[in-house]
Image: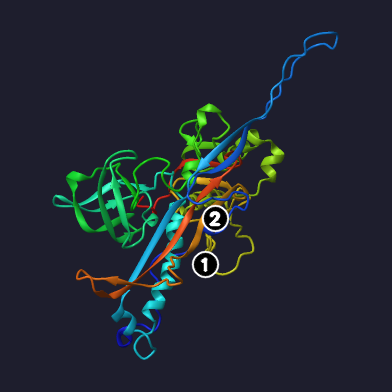
Amino acid sequence: MQEYVRPDLVDLSLSASVLWKRIEENTTIKAVSNRPFRIPTMPIRGGKGRLGSLDNQDMGVGSGPQEVPGTGTCVTLIYAASYSKLSELATDSDEKAIENFATLTHQMATKNFAGYMDAWLQTDGSNTLDTVVNLQTSGANTVGFGVNNANLFQDDQDIDLWTAVGGAFIATVTVQSVDILSNVIWLVNPIATALVAVGNKLMMNGASGQANSGLFGIRNFQVGTNTSNWYNVQRNTYPGKYNTPSLAVNGPLTPALVRALESQRELALGIDEADAAKTIAHSNVDVRNAWEQNALLVQRIDFEGSKGDRSHDMLKAKAPDQIGGRENVVNIRALPGYLDYLCLKNISRVETVPIDFYSVGGQTLFPIYGASGGLASALVFYLVWVGQIVAVNTRLNAFASGITIPKGIFGK
């Protein structure tokens, strides 16, 4: 209530979209109803060159291009938000409260939805958000999970716990609080430690637990080997055609490694094609900081002619916004230890239902019914999206993994 609150409401949750808003709807691929869509590709150009003679000799039989369609299916994300009727009535004027709670709930819903999409974009197609790194226990119960990046989750989010992708479902748990400083997600209700283990998968609520059943996020198409599949095309059928240039750094990020990553793209595509592709870098703050450390190690301060009795500041107010001359989009929901080069002109959204409020006959706000069958004094609304992510030519991208996380972040 207004008497005991500060004059400003502070949003303590991370809510802005970073990568999702950069991926625009693809106008060349249309999803029809809920049927699979097709992505035409040409992995083999065909044609045969040989030595021969035009003096009455057999010139051989040539070959033509091989076209292979990838296929995908749209998936659905539903975001539900609700509030009590009392909270609306108690805050519907400036005399009662600083902010209308119903209006605030709607505003936060759109921002939080964007946060879900940014987190979902980091996945590998199995709806896996993260892996249990350690268990925070109290007696015989686990009260929290240490993870790779706690910012992939949101407060009050329901998540499904699985033994592994394609494994067994364990339970649905609810996040009480995202604690990025400790890199832990704390749970509303504890779960018996005997049921969980390090390495278990934390998936989107409602996941089937199977590979290729969810959004085809970055880790689905940023694959450096000929294993698994690209939109249902087995990569080992056409080795090297559907994978992505990559480097396993397993150490500090250096300028030489970044140049090697660029060179891999040039070798895979040709120098002109690689240069023509408008590519951004995408990373979390750990990779940005690791890149900046290269400059900190070689900087020099010239005291000649300097004035005053204070030492020079060795650090600028802001970190660099480029890596190797490319814009680096820093995303607090990106996986630590990864540097992704993404050619956005080849990454797009295919949508059956764009992000919008769920509507029935124009109505977007619905009453909740109580156990008696009568109305409950609460209201609910939904944001929905039905679509898929398409990455057409993955060799235009590149990624580096295993980059050492600088001390002081992500629990290091």
- In this rendering, would 358 be left or right of 89? right
Residue lying furthest bottom = 95
Badge 1 amino acid: Arg
Q: Measured from the top left, where is residue 100 in percent x and y? A: 39, 81
Query: Vertically, is 219 above or below 185?
Result: above
- In this rendering, would 168 be left or right of 331? left
Residue lying furthest left = 139
101 or 122: nearer the eye? 101
Q: Measured from the top left, where is residue 394 in percent x and y? A: 57, 40
Q: Quadrant of the N terminus?
A: bottom left
- Residue 359, quarter of picture: bottom left
Badge 2 amino acid: Val
- In this rendering, would 74 be left or right of 365? right
Q: Which residue is mark 2?
A: 329
Q: Measured from the top left, where is residue 350 in percent x and y? A: 54, 52
Answer whether residue 351 is visible to the viewer in this image: yes
272 or 241: nearer the eye? 241
Q: Secondary structure at mark 1?
A: loop
Q: Which residue is mark 1?
A: 310
Residue at 20% x, 45% y is 195
Residue at 18% x, 47% y is 193
Residue at 56% x, 70% y is 308
In this rendering, which labeled residue sits more in front, label 2 or label 1?
2
Q: Secondary structure at mark 2?
A: strand
- Residue 67, quarter of picture: top right
246 or 405: nearer the eye? 246
Answer whether residue 17 is visible to the viewer in this image: no
Residue at 61% x, 57% y is 302
